[in-house]
Amino acid sequence: MTRVTGTPSMFGYGVAISDIRVSLPNGLILDCLQKVYPVGRFIAAGFAGSVEFGFAAIHDLQTNLTLTDPERAWMPGWVAFKWFRRARRLFAKAPDRIKQYGGQIMLVGVSPSVDTGIAGWARPTVAILRSLEFFPEILKIDAIESIGSGGGVDVYRDELLFLNNERALWQLEVNSPGGYGHILMRMLSRTVEENPDKFVSLMCICAWSVGVRS
């Protein structure tokens, strides 16, 4: 049972929330697994399905998205449409014991170089790639989608829906750039504290000004 939920915010933030639950072949269920990781500058990735394939995909992304120039960053949409063929090949070469669990990847990132029509705002991207084809599904701004199964993080989906639609909070970004991102982190953290039985271990917010934080 795994659930990773993400949304691209209109204010230039990419958000991902994951649980920590893993089901072992012997039927044992543990709450111990991190499923969202930074893979490049301003880009993070989460996985569901086969844990072995998930870690292989994370490693492949981290290896291929390495940059030595601190002034440069990848465009997450470009990464999704270039990398999905590598994901497909990785999965195709995997043994059947891995394939039986499937593979799903969620890429979350922002691109400061894409024109959003508002100076200083980055373009957020959330892309979902699913076996067998892994062709990217790009979410619309403020859409909320998940990979994996299980209902443990529905409460966080509801919180993201509220944050995306609460107009009173939008003013925070207008008056203070970064303000909306801070309230996202604070309110989601509060939701985690109030729902300790929902198995969430990691929140990731990608933003141009702060990079990837968890």
Image: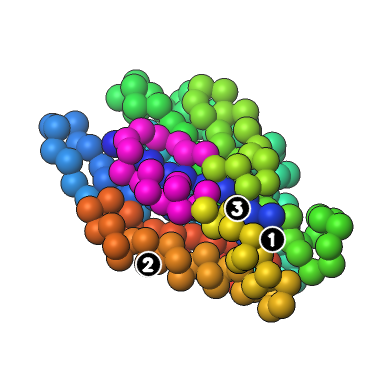
Residue 150 shows in this picture = yes
Residue in the image at 22% along x and 53% along y? 197
In this figure, what is the number of numbered marks?
A: 3
Residue 196 is covered by the magenta coloring = no
Q: Nearer the viewer, mark 1 or mark 3?
A: 3
Quarter assignment of residue 89: top right
Residue 64 shows in this picture = no
Mark 2 is surrounded, within 10 Å at the Cα level, by few (under 14), some (14 to 19) or many (20 or more) other residues, namely few
Q: Which quadrant holds the N terminus?
A: top left
In the rendered image, which residue does mark 2 sit on? 190
Residue type at mark 3 is Asn
**Residue 121: percent from left, percent from top:** 76, 64
Label for residue 11? 1
According to the image, what is the colour scheme of the structure? rainbow
Residue in the image at 69% along x and 37% along y? 81
- Whether the residues at callouts 3 and 2 have beta carbons within 8 Å, the answer is no
Gap between marks 3 and 2 measured at Cα: 18 Å
Q: Earlier in the sequence, mark 1 or mark 2?
A: 1
- Tell me where the magenta segment starts and ends, as one range: 145-161
Secondary structure under tag 1 reads loop
Q: Nearer the viewer, mark 3 or mark 2?
A: 3
Residue type at mark 1 is Phe
Mark 1 is surrounded, within 10 Å at the Cα level, by few (under 14), some (14 to 19) or many (20 or more) other residues, namely many
In the rendered image, which residue does mark 3 sit on? 165
Residue in the image at 53% along x and 70% along y? 183
Which residue lies most toward the bottom here? 176
**Residue 85: percent from left, percent from top:** 62, 31
From what the image shows, is residue 183 above or below residue 90?
A: below
From what the image shows, is residue 5 above or below residue 201?
A: above
- Whether the residues at callouts 1 and 3 have beta carbons within 8 Å, the answer is no
